[in-house]
Amino acid sequence: MVGRLQFPVSLMIPTRAIRPLLLAGVAALLSVGSAGHAADAKAASVLKEKAEIDAGLDRGYAQLDALYKDIHEHPELGFQEARTAAKLAAEMRAMGFEVTEHVGGTGIVAIFKNGPGPMVMVRTELDALPLEEKTGLPYASHATQLWEGKPTPVDHACGHDIHMTAWVGAAQALVAMKSQWHGTLMFIGQPAEETVGGARAMLADGLFKRFGKPDIGFAQHVSNGPAGTLSYRAGVNSSAADGFEIAFKGRGAHGSRPQLSIDPVVEASRFVVDVQSVISREKDPAAFGVLSVGSIQSGTAGNIIPDGAIVRGTIRSYDEDTRTKLKSGLVRTAKAEAEMSGAPPAVVTFDAGASAVVNDDAITGRTGPIFKAAFGDRAVVAPGPGSASEDYSEFIIAGVPSLFWGLGGYDPKVIADAQSKGQVLPSNHSPQFAPIPEPSIRTGVEAMTLAVLGVLGK
């Protein structure tokens, strides 16, 4: 029926009661609108900062590209990064940083003070990997260094050359924009990340006692994802790593008389297969855990049964219960293989290992919106932790709340083409791993600079 609605007297609300409700509703709307305006203003500020960073990159990118290719062509192994460290130290001194070399061996610490404010640590790795590069790039590495006593090819197959170049580029951008922030920059070049010893070495050499303990830390890592993208997440971001070495002992003999031997090659071979039952039958299927053998060394000739074999590998996990289970299962399996062969007990040793990198919730919550404002849908929240490991965790354990994020490094067209053909692109630690410098370096410079400005900006 069309007409004026009539309400029962019992449902009518007095005007004096309605007024506070209306005022509260208006205040809520104003609050939402104010928050929206604040978010829009922050996003606009981030885009303005990014434009300024990009303008500097446009002017100086050729220098960064040359630096990248020089570092890539001259890789160095952990604790042997003398040339690399000296080159980065010179770059930082030229910008006005106070640089100290030989911290924790070949590490460097570069300090830039710009008034009162927090201290922010920005870390890059210096080292490369002991393998022969097979990318075919015009600036490919042909370097060799001693690895376990033998001359060995060396390759930046993990992308640390990208990290170093972006590290220098971020320092340049922050110095150029110093009127827009207050505080102290601690840029560290860490040796020996690949052998998970460099972070501990720097800390043992008094890193935070000598130069101050940072309030916040940042680091990044390139992978074979699409170049120009980045991913981040709060909480566990990487796996824990435990390297192992097993010495199987036997009794040598002629290859034609195996009955006179205790064959350590058989011990090692059985171990490689049998130890996977720890993964498939003892570990919780819902818990991440990997046990991989990467090296078996034994013997000198095909007609000699040797008297020993060395097996080396790695264990990766996210939680301590799984970590403990895999290590104990490995030891039990190795000893059982030796006993089954009637051999002396196998000797199992673990390296110091690296704990999982755990990103700080508050820092991630603060920096994530900056990344989204700057990169839009090219900045994504990672659905879960990565399986690789990082000794950056040592700095977090030492009390530096941090955010560690990932960068894409491959041309999206190359990725799409490989996917259409069912091919798998080379990833980190492959001799064919070859991230494209542009826009990988640019994205790294932008992301790192904006993250620091998010902490130190006025």
Image: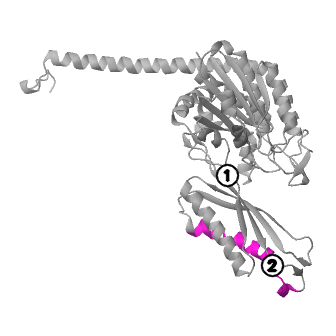
Does residue 82 appear in the picture of this structure? yes
Q: Please, which colouring scheme is shown?
A: one colour
Instruction: Give me the residue at 68% from left, 44% from top.
Output: 391
Does residue 446 appear in the picture of this structure? no
Point out which mark residue 145 bears.
none
Give percent across and percent down for residue 95: 78, 19
Query: How many badges with numbers are in the image?
Result: 2
Instruction: Give me the residue at 62% from left, 24% from top.
Output: 119
Residue in the foreground of this view, choosing between 372 and 95? 95
Label 1 environment density (alpha carbons within 10 Å; few <14, some 14–19, many ≥20): many
Q: In which quarter of the image is the C terminus?
A: top right
Q: Which residue range is magenta in the image?
A: 257-281
Instruction: Name the residue tied to disc 1.
Output: 353
Magenta span dominant secondary structure: helix
Instruction: Name the residue tied to disc 2.
Output: 263
Is 8 placed above or below 405 here? above
Give percent across and percent down for residue 304: 90, 77
Asked where in the image residue 393 lies, by quadrant, the reply is top right
Instruction: Give me the residue at 15% from left, 15% from top.
Output: 16
Give, as a three-letter code, the residue at label 2. Asp
Residue in the foreground of this view, choosing between 16 and 403? 403
Give, as a three-letter code, the residue at label 1. Gly
Q: In which quarter of the image is the N terminus?
A: top left
Give percent across and percent down for residue 211: 69, 27
Q: Is residue 266 magenta?
A: yes
